[in-house]
Image (cartoon, grey):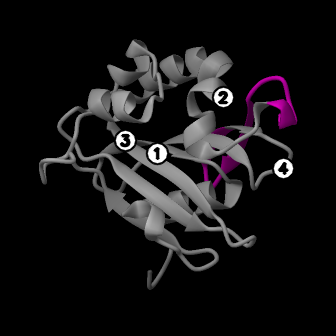
Amino acid sequence: SINAQNPAVGETKFFFITGADSPNSITPDQFNTDLGINMPTDAVSTLVHDAPIIFTLFGKPDGTNGRGMMFRIRDASAANQALMAWEPTMTSSLKDLFKITQQRASSTAFLENVYQGITIRYRNFSDASNSIDYAIILLPDGSTYLLFSNTRDHMFSLIQRAAGSVPGK
């Protein structure tokens, strides 16, 4: 089970999400429903429904695990618009999965940063090690992915790995 995994500090582990009764990947709609994420229909419609969903864990310095998700998307512009429209309720949608306390928000809205040329939208819940971060990235093979994480360092790790800029890993 994913919950039994303990990545080392700074290590990112990747898991392909499958159905409980099937080795096949589940659809974004099913993932959304099973985890109670409540991703809006406009955002779900930008996801590639037959592509695997990837769940990620990241070893945080405090000994806990950061959580993340990767979804293949069809249209980066449409996904970006849908995600920005979701931002006012994204915190309540992801609070349980990402283990965040809404009342500890450091800002009233999402902020923006750029890392290795990739725009990251984020909202910290006291600091960057408790956050909602998301980014859209073009992979070297031409596919486009939506990345989510609950720590800045986890997002940086996902971007490095997706861009192929982590030699030897």
Q: Residue at coordinates 22% horizontally, 40% vertically from top-left?
A: 26
Closer to the eye: label 4 or 3: 4
Q: Where residue 1 appears, x then y in whole percent?
A: 36, 63
Crowd class of label 1 (few under 14; some 14 to 19; many from 20; radius 10 Å): many
Q: Image check: 161 left or right of 126?
A: left
Vertical placement of 65 versus 73: above or below? below
The numbered mark, 2 or 1, whose residue comes first in the sequence reads: 2
Q: Which residues are magenta?
A: 103-121
Residues at marks 4 and 3, CA–CA distance in whole angstroms: 25 Å
Is disc 2 placed on a helix, strand or loop? helix
Which residue carries the number 3 mark?
71
The answer for how far apart the CA atoms under marks 4 and 1 are is 24 Å
The residue that appears at 65% across and 40% down in the rendered structure is 132
How far separated are the C-alphas under marks 2 and 1?
Answer: 22 Å
Counting from the top left corner in percent of width and height, residue 34 is at 35, 34
* Identity, as a three-letter code, of the amino acid under mark 3: Phe
Which of label 4 and label 1 is nearer to you? 4
Q: Earlier in the sequence, mark 4 or mark 3?
A: 3
Give the residue type at disc 4: Asp
Residue position marked by numbered label 1 in the rendering: 137
In the rendered image, which residue does mark 2 sit on?
A: 91
